[in-house]
Structures are given as C-alpha cells and as structure tokens.
Amino acid sequence: MIFSTLEHILTHISFSVVSIVITIHFLTLFLLVDEVVGLYDSSEKGMIVTFFCITGLLVTRWIYSGHFPLSDLYESLIFLSWGFSLIHMVYYFKKRKNDLSAITAPSVIFTQGFATSGLLTKMHQSAILAPALQSQWLMMHVSMMVLGYAALLCGSLLSVALLVITFRKAIKIIGKNNNLLNQSFSFGEIQYMNERSNVLLNTYFLSSKNFYRYQLTQQLDRWSYRIISLGFIFLTIGILSGAVWANEAWGSYWNWDPKETWAFITWTVFAIYLHTRTNKNLEGVNSALVASMGFLIIWICYFGVNLLGIGLHSYGSFTLTSN
C-alpha cells in the first residue's frame, strides 16, 4: 500500500513538473518575452526533478513487484519516458546548456500521459510475471530495446525539425520568385529585376539571420546523427540479446512474428540512415528524410504491433477499455 501510494505521488509530481517545463518553453520560444528568458534554468531544473521522480517511480515499482519493471506496456512506457529524460540529462551535464528539452519534454509528457491514462488502468497494478518473462534476459533485452527506441525517436524528431526549417526556408525563396514572375515587365525590366533578385538572395543568404539558421540546421544534423547512432547500438544489442533469449525459451533464434519483423525493419531503416551519413552528398536533408520515415516505423514496431495482440510477444498487448 505504501509503495503504491508513493508510486502514485511520484507519477503526478513528474507529470506536473514536465507540464510546467513545456509551458516555460512556450513562453520563451513562441512569445519571445525577455522577462521569462531567465526561466530557462528553471526549466532545466524541472527536467532534473522529472528524471529523479521517474527513477524513483521505477525503483519503487521494482521493489514491491519483485521484478524489473518492464513486464507490460504500462511499465515500458514509463521506462521510455525515463529514457527520454536520461538523454536530456546526459546532454545537459555534458554541455551545461541543453536545447533538447524542446524535444525531450513533450516526449516525456506524451508517453507518461498515455501510460497513466484510463486506457492502461488494468496494467497499473503490478502482476506476476508471465512464464515467458521469468528470465534474467528480461532486463538485458527489453531495457536495451526501449532505450534504443527512446534514442531513435529523439534523433528522428531532430531530423523532422531539420526538415521543417529547411523546407520552410525553401518555400519562402520560391514564394519570392513567384511574386516576381507574376508581375508583367518589359524584357529590360525583367532582366533588371532578376539581377536585383539575385543580389537580394545573395544578401539574404549572407545575412545574420540566415547564418543562424544554417548553424541551427547543422547542429540539429549533428545531434540527430549522434543520438541515432547511440540508439542504433542499443537496438542492435536488444535484438541480439532477444535472439539468444528466444532460443532458450522457444528453441529458435528468430521466429518472424510481427514484433520481430518490425524490429528488423526498424533496424534496417536506421542502418540505411547511417549509411547515407557516410556519403557527403546524401547527409543533411536526404538522411533526415530517412530518419523521419524511421520515426513512424518505430511507433508501428513499439506500439502499433501491440494493438494486434498476436504473436509470441502478445503479453505486451492491450485492449481498449471504456468506462
């Protein structure tokens, strides 16, 4: 009873704190109010509090359940939100300034919000492990997979942000060119306007605003590559350890059930992403497109397959309930 109450309290504290963090980011990023810029440090402290609350939640559930808290979808979602906050913490203590909270904070509140929603109420109470999960491989395999998902999702979202910034800039330039073409001028006037347009575009590209945008896209590309590389390592370890566990439990290293198949597809997509990064001509927008496609595939692998409730991994599924 005490552990259950403590878990409930920690869940609400972490959810409330990360909600405040997101509110602060909306104020500082969208309203651009100088008076609230000083709240940046408060948002970072909020993410630290969130990390320790989720850590305490997992430890508490581990103690009173008697097994590592990764036995069902609810526990894996909480662990996924912990993975997002862990990535944030690593970058924060490494650089003392972290812009990843624009990605990690919404990810934490989304995963934790869904985990604590009424859809997974039946999973909130810890139950006895299914026979297939009563193995020492549970911690190794599932933790590596979920940490891999967390890193790959963060890296993919950074790639999505890179694409949004890049295509938004391209649309603005195309819009300016269309405005010039829609006007009727004489040939001499058109030639003059084209020359003037080229000068303005060159000035635009050399402007401080555009230079900042260029630096931002390069930074997003670097962050995305590093985080996805880390997630790919976790995913590879998770798949290999799962194959060993499957051989012990079911007598076969690979069975091509829906979860395994989509895990392999996910691994292949991000292997392609890492391959494109080795080619200078394909890095940037091209590799970001691959990572963005991987974002959708991860959710199909992690969450979508659980809706089917079939296959050897059906213990991670759930059914929609109504009040």
Image (tube, rainbow, N blue to C red):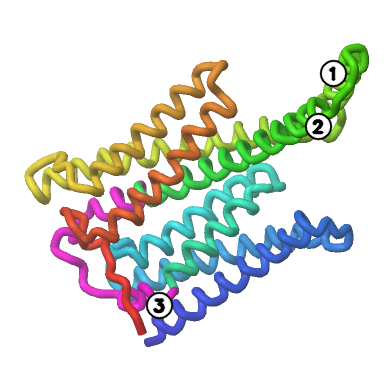
Q: Nearer the viewer, residue 65 or 282?
A: 282
Q: Residue at coordinates 61% horizontally, 66% vertically from top-left? A: 18
Quarter in which the C terminus is drawn: bottom left
Q: Can residue 43 be seen in this view?
A: yes
Q: Residue at coordinates 48% horizontally, 59% vertically from top-left? A: 82
SS class of the residue under badge 2? helix
Q: Name the residue under label 1.
A: 198
Expressed as whole percent of the image width and height from the top left, the position of residue 4 reads 39, 82
Res. 316 image quadrant? bottom left
Q: Name the residue under label 3.
A: 118
Estimate how packed mark 1 is, as few (under 14), some (14 to 19) or many (20 or more) residues with alpha carbons within 10 Å: few
Q: Name the residue under label 2.
A: 179
User: Does the stretch in magenta take in 130?
Assistant: yes
Q: Residue at coordinates 24% horizontally, 44% vertically from top-left? A: 260
Q: Is residue 211 visible?
A: no
- Residue sitting farthest toward the bottom: 1
Q: Is residue 30 above or below residue 130?
A: above
Q: Main secondary structure of the magenta part?
A: helix
Quarter in which the N terminus is drawn: bottom left
Q: In this view, does 8 lie above or below 263?
A: below
User: Does the stretch in magenta take in 199?
Assistant: no
Instruction: Please report the bounds of the magenta region as a residue range.
Output: 117-144
| Distance (Cα) linking label 3 and label 2 | 52 Å
Expressed as whole percent of the image width and height from the top left, the position of residue 114 reads 45, 68
Amino acid at the residue labelled 1: Asn
Amino acid at the residue labelled 3: Gly
SS class of the residue under badge 1? helix
Query: In the shown orientation, is residue 188 left or right of residue 217?
Result: right
